[in-house]
Image: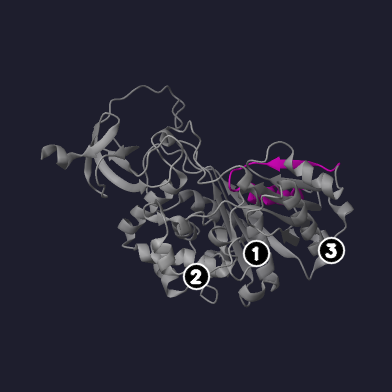
Amino acid sequence: MCSRCLGELEPAELSTRGTVYTYTVVHQAGPGFETPYTLVYVDLPEGVRVLGQLDGNAAIGMEVELAGDRFRPVAEVAA
Amino acid sequence: MSDVYVIGVGMSRFGKFPDRDATELGTEAALAAIADAGIGLREIEGAYCGHVYEGMAMGQRVLAQIGIAGIPLTNVENVCSSGAVAIREASLAIRAGEHDVVLALGVEHLTSKFQGALAPDAADVEAVAGLTMPGIYAMRAMRYFEDYGATREQLAAIPVKNKANAARNPFAQFHEPVSLEQVLEARAIAEPLGKLDCCPVTDGGAAAVVVSASVAKRFRSKAVRLAASSLRTGEVEPEPGTMTFESLTNAAARAAYERSGIGPGDVDLAEVHDCFSIAEALRVEGCELFPRGEYLQAVERGDASLGGRLPVNPSGGLLGKGHPLGATGVAQVVEIVRQLRGEAGERQIEGARVGLAHCRGGKAAGVEGAACTVQVLVR
């Protein structure tokens, strides 16, 4: 339920493009993860921040988009 | 409502002790605190024991060793703030008039439970994506650099400072100072953080004897007043906010300042939860001890070192002294009491009168942080 109004939640469609708020390259992880990998927090236009892995080099402020369950840089797609 | 005082503190050495267990470390700490107070075992009326991973009846195991079983005892789990919450609960029992003498204890034998970094709960939606505890703080560091124009080299000065302090603390896990180069060249954990930016896995115990004003009168030379002991839980986060200022820390600090009538400008030393180098910056800024975005410059100038304007983590902090989860919050109070009594030896801060301890722990999906405590102690 909604933690503000205690009302019902319903699914909402979100953009698949957003802006990198911050990132890291993880070199030590738990079992089941192959290192290194890049993690990004991505701000979506709807006001939601999501965590995911990024293929490619990250920078704060860069535009990324979802490709499957991972992000990739938008510029790379255009090229 | 009685004022609350700490009249005795004690701790085991922190470190990796494969041949010892939590009961033994807790017993050593409890006996040291009781001896430091100079109070009779039979005068202890209640007890609280903070721990995270030690299983059922941890505090009972310790009290059975020292023969004060039978009294009301409560075990406390509140992630990395567990020990600090044990002290808070002791203070509440005294303020409520229920007890006059309470033992607050914290213990953890972490090396028997974990090897590397502690992970968020495996069911956490972000853990599934590969989030690690160092990863969370690494991302906050990256954004801090961006927001405030700070640098990796400035950040590396925090482990250098804290390990130098630990080298002067006989109870610390590490006694070797490290250079800036060593911090920068250490094995990468989550960029920009390297191994020396991360607190170690540690075993240890710490204890404090917490009493009412009427009992404290008998122990004037030792008593330090616990002027506030605040606890806050993270707000839900429906919208993304900044990751470079801790509103949870700020809420706990403001509650402590309001309760104690003491402001950030009155604080002479601080022990804060430096689980990672960047965490120290977020915590002191959240407590309003340094202006927002300026802490790394202050560290570079030496303002937070022993002898500086406001020494931070004179004990060595989590980075240097070690971080046995449940014991950490109590050990911070051990250090502050020793500093305010002038018993801190080689790391003594001259004339220290007011100390602040900040502890913060855990992450639950959807909230900013699980638990945060701020305690203000006054001599």
Q: Quadrant of residue B37?
A: bottom right
**Residue at point 46%, 74% (across, down):** B302
Numbered mark located on residue B38 in the image: 3
Q: Earlier in the sequence, mark 1 or mark 2?
A: 2
Which of the 4 image quarters holds residue B220? Answer: bottom right
Kind of residue at disc 3: Gly
Q: Is residue A40 above or below residue B174?
A: above
- Real-space CA distance between mark 1 and mark 2, rounded to the nearest whole angstrom: 16 Å
Chain to which mark 3 belongs: B
Task: Tell me the SS state at disc 3.
Answer: loop
Mark closer to the chain start, 3 or 1 = 3
Region rendered in magenta = B70-96
Could you say which is closer to the camera, residue A62 or residue B340?
A62
Name the residue carrying label 1. Answer: B335
- Whether residue B2 is visible to the viewer of this picture, yes or no, is no
Q: Which one is in front, B3 or A20?
A: A20
Give the Cα separation between the discs numbered 2 and 3: 34 Å
Contact (Cβ within 8 Å) of mark 3 with mark 1 = no
Point out residue B319 in the picture as x, y percentages from the top left corner: 53, 59
Residue at 73% across / 49% down in the picture?
A: B90
Question: Which amino acid is tagged 1?
Answer: Glu
Whether callout 3 and callout 1 share a subunit is answered yes
Nearer-N-terminus badge (2/3): 3
Residue that label 2 marks = B304
- Evaluate whether residue A6 shows in this view: yes
